[in-house]
Image (tube, rainbow, N blue to C red):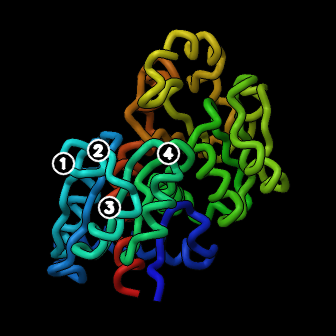
Amino acid sequence: MSPRHFLTLTDLTSDELKQLLSRAIELKKMHRDGTQYQPLKNRVMAMIFEKSSTRTRVSFEAGMAQFGGHALFLSPRDSQLGRGEPIEDSARVISSMVDVVMIRTFEHEKVARFAEYSSVPVINALTDDFHPCQLLADMQTYLEHRGSIQGKKVVWVGDGNNMCHSYMNAAHLLDFQLVVACPKGYEPNTELTAKYADRVTITQDVQAAATDADLIVTDVFASMGQEDEQDARLQDFDGFQVNKELMALAHDDALFMHCLPAHRGEEVTADVIDAADSVVWDEAENRLHAQKALLEFLLCS
């Protein structure tokens, strides 16, 4: 039987996603209560990092340890992938020795191709096109703080990037309206926009977008690998900062999220990210619990 992979949110059905989010909340409570639960004892995860990350490595490595398993960290210097071995060859070999593979890289095609030749589940821990693991954490966080996100207005402010694309997938699966406020030239993928035209709106009017929002989300203006574009992007994104004035247009109980790391004073002001309606720290911690729920789903179902 072919393994289940998690390359985008849409590898889950709507019901599976909802069940996974509820399970993440249960696992979080078990962890905080000190309950030992080790369903992955003697199981091994290979973590392939071509793009570095604090939260991704710590959350997956800690999650496997808490589940009784083990995680192997592989950077480009630590594997033949970094020396040009064909992806399909590495996939066949690595998957024959471990139980699950997590990949964080640039091109989405790399993860898709690895999964095609892998005999075990493959998890996309970020590509240039999608960041589904972060959406698990974001949606868990909203559920914990405000209940169901169905029918809510979610506003993405900034670049139509991998996070934005995964929010579009989430809008489809969890039935909420997504407004993407971005500068001209930074719109999300046109195929996804057309596919989800019934629930995704693109605008350059950030104030109109934020009005009556239930959740406002942003990300850095220049992601990893775009550092040489930093100055140009700061100019292009002028007016797209999430600040107190923008948050004041949202509903009184609106939440603010950011996948981190954040650049205070650029895409978000300090008084927003550190405010009471900011849930970025719960959001960051929930990477651990949501990914544990994902690992349990992929390996124990």
Inspect the image, locate mark 3, and give the three-letter code of the amino acid beneath it.
Answer: Ser
Q: Quadrant of residue 169?
A: bottom right
The Cα–Cα distance between marks 2 and 4, rounded to whole angstroms, is: 14 Å
The residue that disc 3 covers is: 90
* In the foreground, 98 or 137: 98
x and y percent of residue 180 in the render? 71, 38
The mark found on residue 166 in the picture is none
Q: Are marks 1 and 2 in contact (CB under 8 Å)?
A: yes
The residue that disc 4 covers is: 107
Q: Are marks 1 and 4 in contact (CB under 8 Å)?
A: no
Closer to viewer: mark 2 or mark 4: 2
The residue that disc 1 covers is: 78
Closer to viewer: mark 3 or mark 4: 3
The mark found on residue 82 in the picture is 2
x and y percent of residue 171 in the render? 68, 57
The Cα–Cα distance between marks 1 and 2, rounded to whole angstroms, is: 8 Å
Q: Quadrant of residue 204?
A: top right
- Left or right position of 16 against 271: right
